[in-house]
Amino acid sequence: MGGEAPEPRRLSRALSLDGSVVPEEALHLVMGYVDHPRDREAASLVCRRWHRIDALTRKHVTVPFCYAASPARLLARFPRLESLAVKGKPRAAMYGLIPDDWGAYARPWVAELAAPLECLKTLHLRRMVVTDDDLATLVRARGHMLQELKLDKCSGFSTDALRLVARSCRSLRTLFLEECSITDNGTEWLHDLAVNNPVLVTLNFYMTYLRVVPADLELLAKNCKSLISLKISDCDLSDLIGFFQMATSLEEFAGAEFNEQGELTKYGNVKFPSRLCSLGLTCLGTNEMHIIFPFSTVLKKLDLQYTFLTTEDHCQLIAKCPNLLVLAVRNVIGDRGLGVVADTCKKLQRLRVERGDDDPGLQEEQGGVSQVGLTAVAVGCRELDYIAAYVSDITNGALESIGTFCKNLCDFRLVLLDRQERITELPLDNGVRALLRGCAKLRRFALYLRPGGLSDVGLGYIGQHSGTIQYMLLGNVGDTDNGLLLFASGCVNLRKLELRSCCFSERALALAMLQMPSLRYVWVQGYKASQTGRDLMLMARPFWNIEFTPPSPENANRLTVDGEPCVDRYAQILAYYSLAGKRSDCPQSVVPLYPA
C-alpha cells in the first residue's frame, strides 16, 4: 500500500493546474461558465485552489432542505452569493399531511444571512414559515438591492410586511407569493408596489385570496411599463378592462374570474393585450369561451384547471390552440379531449391533468382520463418533457407507448384514482419497465397506484432502470419487503425518495436506505410501524438525522387484515443528510432518533 500512495497525489497536482499555466483570473472566468451544481461540486473537489475559486464565484445555491445545512456554514462556504433558494417542509405539507407547527422557520436564514451576504439580490423560500419580522429584517439589510423575492407556498406573514417590501425595495423585478397563506390587513401594499417599483416585471399572488382593487392594477400597468407577467387572486374580469388597455407589454395573465355566468354583454368589452400568450382564467364557462378565440392561435400556455368547461368545450377550445407548449387541465378533459390535444398541439412540452370532482355522479359522461388518452398524447406530442396525470384506468401498453415516443421526458408523474371498481390490467410491471427503458432523460418519477398495481418484480425493474432518476415518489407499490430491497439495490443515483401507503416493515425500510449511496432525503407515510421506531436505528450513520412520528394513540392497537399489530397509516418517517446536526425545533409530535 505504501508504494501506491504517491499516484493519487500526482493526479491531484496535475488536476490542480499550476498558476503559471492557468492564471487565477482565467480560472475565475472559466468557473463562471460552470452553472450546474453537480459540475461545480465536482470541480471544487479537484484541489484547494479550485475549491476556493468555486466558493468565491458561486452565484446561486439551492438548499434542498432547510435542516440539511446551517446558515453559518453556507455563509462561510459561499460568501458572495447573489441568489439563494431554501426549501422547507416536506412536499406532503401541500396535502395537509404535515402539522402546521412542524418547523421550517425562515428566521435563522434571514437573520444570519441577509446582512452578511452583501451581493444577495434574489431570495426564494418554499414551504417555510415567514413572519413580518423576518421580512422587515430582510428589507433593512437588502431592500436597496433586492431584485427578486419569491415566497412559494409560505405562511405566517401579512400584507403589512408586503407593504414594507413595496415601499423599500425599489429595484424589485419579481414578487412571487403564489399559494401563500397571508393575513389580509388591507390592499395598500398593492398600491404602494405600483407607486414605488417601476421596474417590476413579474407579480404573482395567485391563489392567495388577497383583495384586489382594480384601480391599483391600472396604476401598476401605467407605472410598470416592463410588466410581463401578472397572476392575481379572485377579481371579476370585467373590472380589468382598463388594466388590459394599459398593460401593453403583458405576456402572461392568470387569476381573474367570471362571477356572472352567461352575461355576454358584461364581458364583451374585455380585450387582452396583443402580446398575451399565456392565460389562466377562473370560472370560465361555455358561454365565455369566445373571449379566448381571437388570440388562441398565439397561446403558448393555457391553464383550464379552475374552469367550468365540459369535455366538449375542451375539445373546441384546444382545437384552436396549435402552438401550445404548456397545458394544465382537470381530468374532465377526458380521453376525447386528449385526443384533440394529440392531433393539434404538436409542440406541447408540459401536460398536467389534475383530478376533478371525486363524485362519479357529478362527473361528465365523457370525462375521465385512461390509457386511451395517454397513448394518444404519447404518440401525437413527441416533444413532451413533463407529464403529470390523474387517471381512472391505465395499462402496460400505455406506459410502453410513453417510453417509445416521449424520448425527451424528464419528469413523469402518474396517480391511479380508486374511483373505478376494476382496472383493466394490473400489475403494471412491464409497462413501467418499458417506460423507464425508453425515457433515458428521466430525472423525476412518481407512481401512485392502488394495491396490486406494482408487484415486487416491478419494484425491482424500477431499481434496475432508474439510473438517471434523482427524485422518486411511490405509493401503493410492492408486495413484500423483498420488493423494496430489490428496488433499493439499483437506485445508485437517487437523492430523494418519498413512499406512501406501502406494506413494508421498519426493518426493511432501514436496510433499503443503507443500499442507496446517493440518498440524502427520505419521507415515508403508511407502513408497518412500531410505537417507538426502534428498527429505524439500523439506518443510523454519521450526518444522518432520523425523525419519527409515531402512530396516533387511538389507532396504536389496530391490526392489519393479516393480524399484524402496530400498523397505522399515519405513522411517518423523515430521514435526511445534514451538516447542521440535530435540529432544536422539533414539535412534540416528532421523535428525533439518534444513536445511543
Image: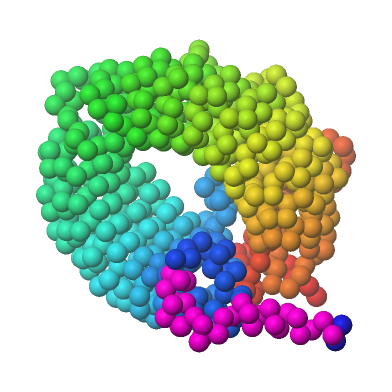
Q: Which of 426 and 110 is in front in this view?
A: 426
Q: Which residue is depicted at the point 38% across and 70% down?
A: 82
**Above or below 490: residue 285:** above
* x 63%, y 42%: residue: 440
Point 15% across, 51% down: residue = 225
Name of the residue lying farthest toward the top: 365
- 262 or 402, nearer to the observer: 402
- Range of magenta residues: 3-32
How far across and down, in percent of the image, does residue 596 sit?
80, 75
**Residue 331 visible in this rendered orientation of the protein:** yes
Q: In which quarter of the image is the N terminus?
A: bottom right
- Up-down: is 359 above or below 105? above
* Closest to the observer, 461 or 526: 461
Is 400 rendered above or below residue 61? above
Q: In which quarter of the image is residue 5?
A: bottom right
Give the overall secondary structure of the magenta segment: helix
Type of colouring: rainbow
Q: Compared with residue 471, is residue 591 higher up or lower down, i.e. above or below?
A: below
Residue 166 image point, x, y percent: 23, 62
Query: Is residue 174 found left or right of 582 in the rendered image?
Result: left
Query: What residue lies at 38% left-to-right and 49% top-to-bottom?
Result: 178
Q: Is residue 10 magenta?
A: yes
Task: Give percent across and percent down for residue 91.
Answer: 56, 51
Indicate left or right for 503 with 42 as reference: right
